Amino acid sequence: MLELRAPAETVGAARAHLGELQCSVPAAIEDLDEQPPQAWCLGCATALVRAGDPVVNYRPFDDRGEYARVLAGGSTAVLPFG
């Protein structure tokens, strides 16, 4: 797993940097906001959450909900209100 921590102004750079890497781990999610859709392994997707650039419009490739738990634990983008 890659560990990225980025200031707010370089959040997009974290996604670009990870996107350039050739990860050999099977994909856990598919980012539906990218065209064509970008596949991310759980480790790389978790690094994006920690960098402040979570993938929130995604299709999971598993039925265990691992990435949903990562989002719920590390991103204000998916916290329920009310």
Image (cartoon, rainbow, N blue to C red):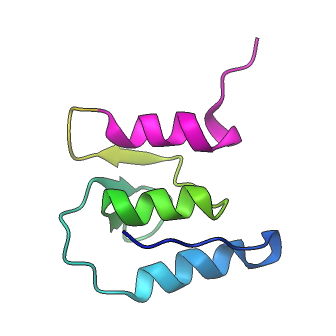
Residue at 21% across / 33% down in the picture?
63
Q: Residue furthest right?
A: 9
Is residue 38 shown above or below 19? above
Residue at 18% across / 64% down in the picture?
26
- Is-magenta flag for residue 52? no
- Is-magenta flag for residue 79? yes
Residue 42 drawn at (x, y percent): 33, 56
Residue at 56% across / 55% down in the picture?
49
Is residue 11 shown above or below 55? below
Residue 12 drawn at (x, y percent): 66, 75
Residue 64 drawn at (x, y percent): 24, 32
Residue 35 drawn at (x, y percent): 43, 70
Residue at 81% across / 76% down in the picture?
9
What's drawn in magenta, residue-wise?
65-82
Screen quadrant of the N terminus: bottom left
Instruction: Please identify the quarter of the rendering in which residue 30 is found.
Output: bottom left
Q: Is residue 28 left or right of residue 31?
A: left
Q: Is residue 51 left or right of residue 31?
A: right
Which of 45/1 is in front? Answer: 1
Which of 54/70 is in front? Answer: 70
